[in-house]
Each structure stands twice: as structure tokens, then as C-alpha cells.
Image (cartoon, rainbow, N blue to C red):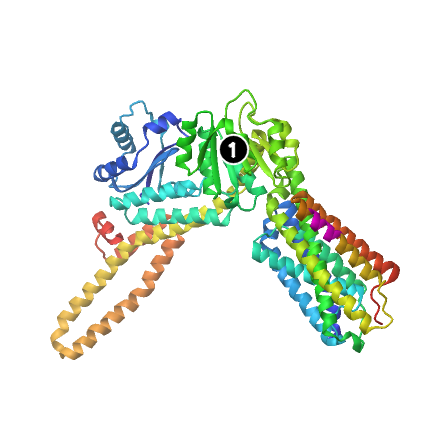
Amino acid sequence: MNLFLLGISHKTASVEVREAVAFSNEETAQILPELQEKFLKEAVLVSTCNRTELYGVPHDDSFKSEDLVNFLIEWKRANFLKPQHFYIESSFKAAEHLMEVTSGIDSLIVGDVQILQQVRDAYELSGEKRTAGTLMHELFHTSFRVGKRAKAETAIGKGAVSISYAAVELSEKIFADLKTKKAILIGAGETAELTAKHLRNHGIGHLLIANRTLERAQNLASQYGAMAIPLSEINQFLKNVDIVISSVHSQDYILKREDVKAAMKTRPSAPLVIVDIGMPRNIDPKAGEIDNVFLEDIDSLEMIANANHERRKSELPKVREIIAQELQKFKEWAAVLDVVPTIKSLRDKCEDIRQSGLQKYKYKFAPEDFEKVDELTKVLVNRILASPISALREYSQNSADHPADTEQILHAVQQLFALPPRSEAEEDKVKK
Amino acid sequence: MLAAISILNIFLPLGYTVTAFFYGRAFLKGDEFADKHKSNFLSLTLFMHFLSSALRTAEFRHIPVTSFYELMGMLALTISAAYLFIEFSTKVRNTGFPILAICTVLVLLDSLFYKQYYGVQDVLKSELLAFHVIAALVGYSSFTLSAVYGFLYVILYKKLRSKTFDTVYQNLPSLESLEKLANKGIIIGFIALAFSIVIGFIWLPRAIESFSKADAQFIGVFLTLVVYGVGISVIKFAGLRGRRLALLAVIGFIVMCISVIFANTFTGFHNFR
């Protein structure tokens, strides 16, 4: 199978190198037609923050991967890139790699669920640009199926593996429904932003953002439908919130034990979750001794994240099993695809013989009888060809792992029935 | 039919044991096979239990609630049926192990002390008695379930405080879910048992002259209701919840068990024979 993969990822290159070869949607839309014209008759380009991968079917045997690498480097003006930054796979290895990507097991964070949608977006863009053909359609749909099955049949994507997500997961272990809860984020940096995103995705009822610089809090609040408050007013809101997540840099405690105790007096049995992601710690550790206060620091969250990471890793064999099953189906499909031109050629040959015979004896039948003869010969030819065609398909499926065996059979059929030699253009037309 | 009843008498405790084992494996070890099939085992065991009760009713011409041990068996049936309902309606599937362990013990008692009582006295063929028994079963089942959820609440609370994020932590539902389930169990149990004792006080002395209001079972239930009633009032008026409610559920259950065991051991169950 003439499938080709050229890629660069977090496994082979640093972020500085990866960002040099990252393609925006606009750039992808621009380069795909050029790639199709110069190198590949089918092409799909996947570009995310952790990888850029080009899947394609070369025009012919004169294709050289070095030429493609040089073209990409020149296109992106990234002359510092070296060949070792790239990896190249071909045929079913390339197909297997794509399935590993869509299942999330090749991601920086094992079980990453976002990658499936990113690959889908890339495939849709190639569809718009008409650079995806029969092989790409089947390959990508199979890979999407792998991604869906991995998500549904295994726990590869379950459990928080990042600190900010672990904070939200911890809150959900205490509160049944975040929709009725209020949370306050102390800080407006990257961690606070990620946490706000996760909280919103999990349906938090009300969100407040407190920061020393009110403007930064307001910027973040506007992105996530939250209310911004000055850091100095936290204690006023503390008695009304259920979750506090703090991630600021401060030498002093933002919340002391007395502050938390005073808040808990107004809400004696309602739990309060406080997550301290700050370094040094933002919350007085003694606050965790108060009844119904659950104070977790970065160590707890790392324990949760690590435990989840290990659980995800233990799911790898199951995902590989799914990939093996789908890859085998893909191989069988590809094997049948290879015999389609020969089958068509055989049918065409038999039809030619039938038509030539009919024309020769046409005037020996009355018109209404001729119609019946036409129908009869059609049925006869179909019945004669049914068994060999079915056997050919079956043989190609069973020999999916040994394409050379299928080639031999096809050659024998060509010889036996004196079929014309296959040209590539004809094969492509038939396969489409 | 007697043969079928005898066979089920052996298979029922076995069914509950296997089901509790599966729930235990899933809860404590995260066993995927056990997790996938545990509810099916429970459904099958419940079906066997319903069948057993139906056969006993048909054979002995009364529902199997005329002795202490028969009641234990019926209690197991109502508890496990209520739990299966909770599982389907709330999708909380990981709290079955302690509940089914209790049911296994109850069913074992019923099977070990199974006797063939044919027919009942006419005075006991009363709809009011039926309501009394059903209300009592609902009450005891609800208190049992609330105690289990209260117990699990305390376990999760301790794990969170001690930062123990193990398999049991992963498998338990949220604290709030456990609290809600425990709370519902307490309220339903209190209402049902109060209903049961009211009917009992009204009907039984009229039906049986020799019946004494100092019956140990009545005193035990009354004491149980007082404990739960005081607890509910304190929690409601003081606005307490969470761990305190969980502890009420567990303490109330302990009082209930002690009163039932005391009543049965030292003075005997309601004796209608």
C-alpha cells in the first residue's frame, strides 16, 4: 500500500523546533494544493501544538521523501531544521501510527481526548481542498473509529492528569453537582485560567476571580463569564463560596486559619474545599484542621494526577488491542482495493466477449427473442464470474499481511484471461 | 414445590454471597469484570429471592413474615430491591458491597433457621397487619441503607482528610451524594417506622387480647424512633449536616439492631403461635 507519513512531534523535537513547522489553518489550506501538485496525489496535514504530520499517497515511484522535507523547510523558512527532527513511516506502519495518534496513546499526556477533534478538523480541511482520496477517507474514518472505541471501551482518557484538572476532580468528589456551587479563584495567571476553563466545562454555577491587579482579574473574568473582585475583599465572599482555588505568588498567607474559621461559623456543616496550588503556599495549613474544610495542596493534586496517569498507562494494552483489530480490518480493505482493477478488467473482458457474440448473431433472432438472449447471456456471464471474483476477494483479504501473494494471483488471472496490463491512471479511476 | 423451595433455600445465600463478592471485588480492587457483571448478578439473585418468596407463599399459604428469621429474609429482599432501584435511578453503582454483605447475613439466617409453617391464625389475615409489616420492612430497610451511606460518608471523609486517594476513594461517589442518600433513608425510615408502630399500637391490642403494650419489639422500635427523631430535630433546627448526619444514621442503626436483637433474644419476637 502506497501510504506515506512524514512527521515531527514532541518525541523528536523541542517546542521551538515544533513551532517552526506548525501550520495554521490558513497555511494548511495554502500548502495542501501545492503538495498535491508536486508530490502527493492524496494529502492530509495534521498540525497541533505537539505535532505536525503529513499523511499522503505519492504520485509515483519517483517520489523521494528528502525532496518533500526540503520543500516543507523552505516553505516555512525554517532552515535550522534537521532530518533527525522528522520521522518517516510508510504503508501500514503509517496507518498504525495515525491510529495511535487518534486513540491518544501517542500524545504528550496519554489519553489526551482533544487530539481526535484536531485530527478530524485537519481531515475536514483536506476534504474542502479536495486533497483527500479513497485511501485517506478510509484511513481517517478507521482512525476516528479507533479513537471513539478507545474512549468508549477503555479508561485511557479518564481521570485528571493535570494539576488544575485534579483540583476540579477533587471538588467533584465532595460536591455532587457543581452547577449549584460557587467557586473563587485567587490569581489570574495561566494556572487560574486553566482552572477556570475546567470549572466552566464542568458546569460550575458561579465563578469569582480575585487578583491583586483588578484589571487582570476582569480580563480573565470576561473570558469565562465570571465576576472579578479585588484580593482585599476575599474574606467578604468566603462565607458564600464552596470552592476556593488559589494560585498566586505571595510570601504571606492570603487566607489565614482565623479567616476560614470565621467563614465556617456562618456555614457550620457545609463543606468548603480549598485547593492551594501556590508556591509558597497561599493558605495557612492550619485551616485544614477545621471541621468540614478540605484543604489540599499541590502535593495532593500531584498524587491524584500521578495515580490517574498510572491508571491510564495500564489501559495501553487494551487500546493496542483495538488498534490491532482495526488495523487488520484496514489491511483487508486495502487488499480488496488492490484486486478491484483486475476484477473490473475481467468483467470488462467478459462483457466485450458477450457483446461481440451478441452482435455476431443478432440477426438470427427476432427482436423480442434477442432481448431474452441478451438477458440470458448476462446472467450466464455473472454466474460464471461470481465464484472466481468472490474467491479473489476472499484470497486478498486472507493474504492482507502478504501482499506479494495477492500480486502473484492477480498476475495469474491476468495471464489466464489475457487481460490488458494495469495502468496506474486506470487503477486510480477504478479505485475512486 | 417443597423441593424447589429447599433448593432455593441453598442457592439464595449462595447467590447473595457471590453477588456481594463481585461488588466487593469491584469496590476494593477495581476489578473490571466484577464491575461489569455485578448488577446482573444482583438482578438474578433478586429474581431468585422473589421466586422463593412466591413459592413459600403458595406452599405455606402465607407470606414469609411470621417468624423473626423469615422477616430477616424479607428484609434482605426489600433492602436489595431498594438498592437496585437506587443504582438504576441515581447511577451510583459502587456502594453495594456493604449493603449486600448485610443482605447475605440476613438471608443466611433465614435459610439456616427455615421452618415449614403451614397457614396462619385467622386474626393475622388482616390488611392492617399487612400494612404494619410492609411499613416496618420499608422502615428497617431505609434505616439500614442510610446507615451504610452514612458509614461510607465517614470513610470518604477520612480518606479526604488523610489524603488517601486509593481505589476505594476512586470508587466512592461524592460526599454530597452519600449525604443525600443517607438523609433520604433516615426520613423515609422514620416516617415508615412511625406509621408501622402507630398501626401496631392501634390494631394488635384489639386483635389479640393477651397482647401486651410492653412488648419488647414495640419498646425497641419506639426507642429507635426516639433516637432518630431527636437526631433529625437537632440536625434540622441547628442546621447541621454532613458528618453529623452520617453519624446519626450509623448510631440510629446500631440502636435499632441492639433493640431488635435484645427483643428477639431475651423476650422473643411477636409470638402469634
**Does residue A391 appear in this view?**
yes
- Give the amino acid type for the residue marked by disc 1 in the picture: Ile
A292, above or below A298, in the image? below
Residue A104 coordinates in the image, percent (x, y):
44, 41
A53, above or below A355, in the image? above
Residue A105 coordinates in the image, percent (x, y):
46, 39
> How packed is label 1: few (under 14 Cα within 10 Å), some, or many (20 or more)?
many
Q: Quadrant of residue B157?
A: top right
Q: Nearer the viewer, residue A227 or A33?
A: A227
Asked which secondary structure carries label 1, the reply is helix
* Residue A423 located left or right of residue B189: left
Q: Nearer the viewer, residue B78 or A318?
A: B78
B91, above or below B175, in the image? below
**Image: magenta residue range:** B227-234
Which residue appears at 38% of the width and 54% of the height? A397
Which residue appears at 41% of the width and 32% of the height? A220
* Residue B252 located left or right of residue A36: right
**Does residue A246 appear in this view?**
no
Of all residues, the one furthest to the front in this rendering is B237
* Number of marks in picture: 1
A355, above or below A2, in the image? below
Which residue appears at 60% of the width and 31% of the height? A260
Q: Quadrant of residue A308?
A: top right
Q: Nearer the viewer, residue B10 or B272?
A: B272
- According to the image, label 1 marks what residue? A163
Q: Quadrant of residue A40?
A: top left
Residue A107 coordinates in the image, percent (x, y):
44, 36
Tell which subunit mark 1 falls on: A
Residue B171 coordinates in the image, percent (x, y):
61, 46
Magenta segment, prevailing SS (helix, strand or loop): helix
> If the image is split into quadrants, where does the N terminus of chain A sit?
top left
Q: Is residue A14 magenta?
A: no
